Amino acid sequence: MSYDSKFFGWGSIKIEDLLVAYRKAKADCFFENTFPTAIKFAEYEQDLLANLNALLSRLQIDLWL
């Protein structure tokens, strides 16, 4: 799997970008011992694609406000 990480502005974000960002955020948080987040990640992952699609929609809507 190849991923191109060039940023062309908030309007060009795709679901693939959010999936990569989510994986990176999850890895970072699991290495942080002072802030327990495992439960929150597990809850968010119950419907990961729907949650990320909702986030993507909110990001795109906020661009027009």
Image (cartoon, helix red, strand yellow):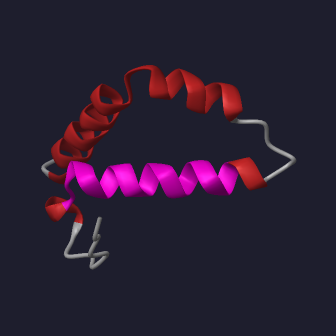
* Residue that appears at 58% across and 32% down: 41
Residue 61, relative to residue 13: is it above or below? Answer: above
Which residue sits at x=23%, y=63%?
10
Residue 30, how many percent across, how many down? 72, 48
Considering every residue shown, the one lying at the far right of the view is 34
- Magenta-drawn segment: 13-29
In the picture, which quadrant includes the N terminus?
bottom left
Picture quarter containing residue 14? bottom left
* Residue 42 picture location, percent across and down: 58, 26
Is residue 17 rendered magenta in the image?
A: yes
Relative side of 47 to 25, left or right: left
Q: Horizontal and vertical percent for residue 9?
A: 21, 71
Of residues 64 and 40, the one nearer the viewer is 40
Q: Does the magenta stretch include residue 21?
A: yes
Residue at the spot 18% in from the left edge and 53% down from the top edge: 63
What residue is rendered at 49% in x and 27% in y? Answer: 44
Q: Is residue 48 above or below residue 64?
A: above
Q: Is residue 34 left or right of residue 60?
A: right
* Residue reaching furthest to the bottom: 6
Q: Can you tell which quarter of the image residue 51 is in?
A: top left
